[in-house]
Image (spheres, rainbow, N blue to C red):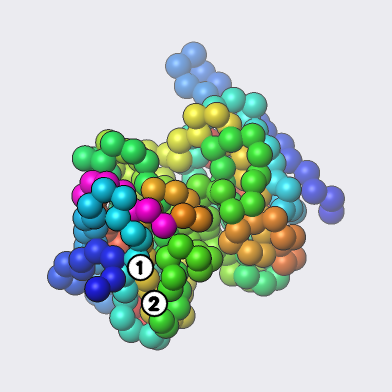
Amino acid sequence: MATSYKSSPFSSPALQRYLVKGVEVDENGRVNATGAPGSVYTAHITGGSGQNYVLIWDGTAATTEAAEIVIPSGSGEDLVMYVDKGITCATAITFSASSVPQGGAAPSGNVNVNLFTS
Amino acid sequence: MAGGTIGTHLTIPAKAGDVLVKYAQSYPTGGMLTATQVDPGNSGGTIQAVEIDASIVAADCYVRFWFTNSEPIAAAEAVKLLLKGYGGKKVQYTFGSGVTYTSELWIAVCTTSITGDIAPDEDLAVNILLTPA
């Protein structure tokens, strides 16, 4: 399966949320996942065939050694992270997966990342 | 003397075996960053939740975690887990199935994310709920 991303907006008059689904997320990541500033409230990470890391940036580039959040994910692990106040991304929500915590290297195996964001 | 200070390990009644590590870091302006050993056992454990209280800190900060059996060089060694704290706020990260480590656990709080070695100017607190192996 090829790398793909899908952002589904759920809107109401006073509330808008996005479920960002990243399948086979690579080291280049998904830049500006929702097309707007926002906050990440939940990250769901699955897959991988070795030690991987999911990185999140507040910005429009997946710059090596500059991520603001680094989440480890073991081989085949199913990890959910909840953030009560949210990870604030005043510029844009950008994320990637990598086999190293600095980012920039391809992940081991296929890593899937789902983000629940505002 | 590494980094900050560690408070009493408190048992959380909700789940036997869990401990709450209360970590406080205080540095003079521009203080050099060093890591502090949070879990001295080298048999590992699971991080269940992390609360970063930067309520009285003006700027954002970053909590770096290392899973290693010797003191990491905070400015150079790659982190294993990195979480952001927000100036003037308290934020909690909760892991559904926990983040597993198989060694000692070390942390430090820095003004920059992955690189850099300058600690925040003001006091802040990090509370870590973990389950030792």
Q: Callout 2: 10 Å neighbours few (<14), some, many (20+)?
A: some
| Sequence-wise first label, 1 or 2 | 1
Q: In which quarter of the image is the C terminus of chain B?
A: bottom left
Q: What residue sits 66% from the left and 39% below the top?
A: A61
Instruction: Decide whether the magenta segment is chiefly helix, strand or loop.
Output: loop
Give the residue number, with chain letter if any, for mark 2: B71
Q: Is residue A34 visible?
A: yes
Q: Do the residues labelled 1 and 2 touch (CB within 8 Å)?
A: yes
- What's the magenta region? B117-123
State the image quarter where residue A7 is shown. top right
Q: What residue type is labelled 1?
A: Ala
> Disc 1 is attached to a residue of which chain?
B
Q: What residue sits 58% from the left and 61% below the top?
A: A101
In the image, B24 versus A25, the foreground residue is B24
Q: Position of residue B112 (x, y in %)?
A: 44, 49
User: How far, Cα to Cα, is label 1 from label 2?
Assistant: 7 Å
Q: Where is residue B108 in the image (x, y as percent from the top left)?
A: 35, 61
State the image quarter where residue B127 is shown. bottom left
> Disc 2 is attached to a residue of which chain?
B
Q: Callout 1: 10 Å neighbours few (<14), some, many (20+)?
A: many
Name the element at disc 2: loop
B100 with respect to B16 (left or right): right
In the image, B40 versus A117, the foreground residue is B40
Q: What residue sits 59% from the left and 53% below the top?
A: A65
State the image quarter where residue B47 is shown. bottom left
Residue B35's tag is 1
